[in-house]
Amino acid sequence: MDIITDIASTMLAQLQKPTLSFLIGGMLLAAMGSKFEIPQPVYKFVVILLLLKVGIGAGMSVRDANLAQLVVPAVGAAVVGIAIVLIGARTIARTRGISHMDGMATAGLFGAVSASTLAAGMAVLDSENIAYEGFIGALYPFMDVAALVTAIVLAKLAEARQGAAAVQGGTMTIGGARAGGPTVEGGLVRTILKDTVQSPAISALLLGLALGLFARPETVYASFYEPLFRGLLSILMLIMGMEAWQRLSEMKGVAHAYIAYGLLAPLVHGALGFGAGLIAHEVTGFSAGGTVLLAIMAASSSDISGPPTMRGALPKANPSAYVGTSTGLGTPVAILSIPLWMALADALIGF
Amino acid sequence: MDIITDIASTMLAQLQKPTLSFLIGGMLLAAMGSKFEIPQPVYKFVVILLLLKVGIGAGMSVRDANLAQLVVPAVGAAVVGIAIVLIGARTIARTRGISHMDGMATAGLFGAVSASTLAAGMAVLDSENIAYEGFIGALYPFMDVAALVTAIVLAKLAEARQGAAAVQGGTMTIGGARAGGPTVEGGLVRTILKDTVQSPAISALLLGLALGLFARPETVYASFYEPLFRGLLSILMLIMGMEAWQRLSEMKGVAHAYIAYGLLAPLVHGALGFGAGLIAHEVTGFSAGGTVLLAIMAASSSDISGPPTMRGALPKANPSAYVGTSTGLGTPVAILSIPLWMALADALIGF
Amino acid sequence: MDIITDIASTMLAQLQKPTLSFLIGGMLLAAMGSKFEIPQPVYKFVVILLLLKVGIGAGMSVRDANLAQLVVPAVGAAVVGIAIVLIGARTIARTRGISHMDGMATAGLFGAVSASTLAAGMAVLDSENIAYEGFIGALYPFMDVAALVTAIVLAKLAEARQGAAAVQGGTMTIGGARAGGPTVEGGLVRTILKDTVQSPAISALLLGLALGLFARPETVYASFYEPLFRGLLSILMLIMGMEAWQRLSEMKGVAHAYIAYGLLAPLVHGALGFGAGLIAHEVTGFSAGGTVLLAIMAASSSDISGPPTMRGALPKANPSAYVGTSTGLGTPVAILSIPLWMALADALIGF
């Protein structure tokens, strides 16, 4: 019974946290037909600030890390991030009734990392006096950015292929003039990569990364981007909540698939991360504590960098699918799985 | 002579405070024909943030209060808030030459509460070692929201009736097709209440209240909504000052009515609040200090939650009337009346 | 060799500072064809907030200064600010191939003051235990505002004359009806001064000055305008960088003129400031330390108040010219010249 109470209270605490409570607040506003709205230019600016902040923070943490020690676990983190999205592309994104776009956005968020879940994991290890590498914080952008970019590119690729197929099929009669898309697959990938890099969302993220890596934005980060972050995220969540409500009907009949994915995926992903940690342990002596944290990163799903990125890059994806599944289910399960990875690490490596 | 110097220096200090000085600054800009302007989308967002902040803060203070003890004084506070608006509806809003809308907006602001005046009252009691209930801060939203919503609904109701009358009168010849408004009064009230709740301003306020009551927005409140509040209010005051100047001519000939109301109303309202405190004292043993603070709340007029709410909900009301009267006259008089309520409480209840 | 290393590391440090690194970031975004953009209404609001902050800060520092002692050095500072712009009008703004508007904007920035360079100078004097007047910080708005307004008025005057000349010349055939501009020079100056004062940028600056001087905006300044400043500036720099890149081609062939001006002007201007300090020393006993700081002020070029003012008041001027020259060259040279003014002051006045 205790475990059920634990789960219930963890989920209630998640629901009361700013991220989800503002999302629910936005849904309530939409449900009661409110004329409340965030003006479009402000909304765009909020997304830009959020992505700049995420990028700058990640860039600074990579810059401050010991690059030699970082390489093996960083490659591992990126591979895990990509693998999670590829698994999602073959599971949740292929489920009947779920749009491919929604499925890929959800997989992207599960591949990305929740900084707060990672922080919770660190706090647990600290309280147990279990050591881990100081550069762990610098690993998360590798998994995060790899997962988000993979998901976005795959989603756009599928959309472009679908568009091309539609043109070759039904709408062919319109005439060859409008026949869209390059026929060579390689050209398509290149176009989509270029589009992705040039899109406002990914541009802002990459710009932030570059500034964090090569400049010294510490003062402006600490006085502006960092303090405003949670507040601007709460505004974004309101907007996404209102939109989610308007699109909730799309989820009828497929909700069970999202629930199953939200409950199981963190465990599968965590095991992948744990495996990558084990390999790094064999190759470079990566610590048992670091392995636990890599598992937690992989198990976690993004509640911070992910939603604004997906919103900016894949505007057609339904936020009630991806934010609801990741923040409402993925994050609580990931937090509850922390003791599992600790027990595994103690058994296989030993603290 | 001392009292006159006191009043003059209190009023000068009020004029120099951000709220009024930015309002005057906006008026000066308009007076010199400046092309300065705050873009519309930003202005809308500023109002939304202000109302969310007011709502969240009020919701959290109610949530943290002892609800059992709170009930009687809270009902008293709400009744006083409504009574003040009803008095205003029969005095300032009925004065010849003052538009009903402007009068109701002014009455609403005098019914609403100034958090800084309340804080001044608490500071005075603290310095005299006079005890009061810890939940006092949770009383203010009851008076505040009750007064603001009553004023807005009454103002919209009067406007709708006027519109209907106009249709039935002069413009009747246009034809029955455009004949507006439900004929049954109850339907009209329901429509206006629905419109009010769905309006962006009241939606934001209610959403904030709900988030403060049921979620845990403490971190985002402390890192974002609270620190940005005074600054965003200064921006709103600039906008309202510019608009006030453009509409100042409307106040010619009726300024004396606003002055009389601004000077007398705080004393009448304070007496009402004091009476509610006395009743709560008899019923539940509400303290003498609490009674003084309830009187101060009632005497005070809103300089914070009121202006953005009125601006959002009653855009046709003239800010130079309601902000000028409440912040320029009502607040100084309310502050100066603090010793009066203390003397009364000492005489009637005893500290 | 040491001096070259010093210069190189000073310039690298400048490049990594938020101001220049965000400018470069914006240029990179534009270079890679990003669709990143800051919405227009947000951009306007950012400029307004920056200028309000600059004005309020300057107004408060003048208010807190001892006015009697301030007069002579303040007049000196204003005269130096104007003189620098007039020199620029006859040098950089007259260079073949450089648009007059770009040249005047650059001269205006070199006349304006860099608060951070001034702070660096104060820190050096403090570390050497060299005394200076406490009101030094209040001198900078005099030089700053005098230079910016002079540059803007001269630039607009030249533009208006050019427009009038064009009308009298080639486009005369359109017909007298559209013949533009007052014929009397005095009327033109008055019109331009009025336009300048009423322009959003200068209105915001003057409003801030007035609020700082006559009101008590300390709380809202400390909680809002001051903490947001560097962050909003970084946003402005991004915007200006993107625009600068799009207009970089205009600078081909004239870059050497900007480089020469950026390297030499700070030394000439510093000598002017030093001279003004010497006069104040003779007249009112202004200290040797104060004279050094006045020289540093004059040598410095604005990286803070200047760019948003020029952007708002002279939208046609090319930011890659004026921001690049002042922040990229002027500021490092001004910082490196600090020991020069100290040696001069020691020799001519004695610490």
Image: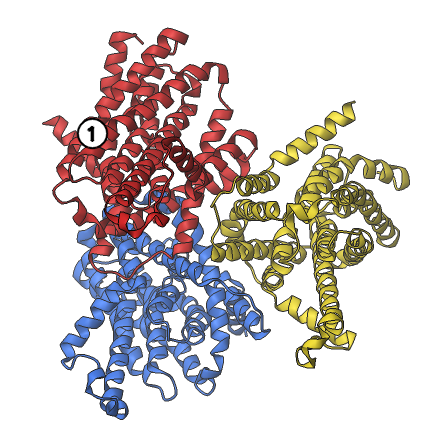
Chain colours: A yellow, B red, C blue
Q: Inspect this view and state whether residue C36 appears.
A: yes
| Residue A139 x, y percent position in the rendering | 72, 53
Question: Which residue position holds label 1?
Answer: B91
**Location of the C terminus of chain A (image quadrant):** top right
Q: Examine the rendered structure and indicate whether residue A65 appears above or below residue B253.
A: below
| Residue A31 x, y percent position in the rendering | 56, 40
| Residue B279 x, y percent position in the rendering | 34, 11
Q: Examine the rendered structure and indicate whether residue A220 appears above or below residue C273.
A: above
Q: Is residue B118 left or right of residue A91?
A: left
Q: Is residue B145 left or right of residue B219?
A: left
Q: Is residue B93 left or right of residue A243?
A: left
Towards the viewer: B227 or A161: A161
Specify the quadrant of the image occupied by residue B125. Answer: top left
Towards the viewer: C65 or A197: A197
Specify the quadrant of the image occupied by residue C81. Answer: bottom left
Crowd tier of the residue under label 1, counting other residues whose Cα lies within 10 Å: few below 14, some 14–19, many 20 or above: some
Q: Examine the rendered structure and indicate whether residue C282 appears above or below residue C8.
A: above
- Under circle 1, the secondary element is loop
Q: Residue at x 11, y 42 (%)?
A: B253
| Residue C278 x, y percent position in the rendering | 24, 66
Q: Chain of mark 1?
A: B
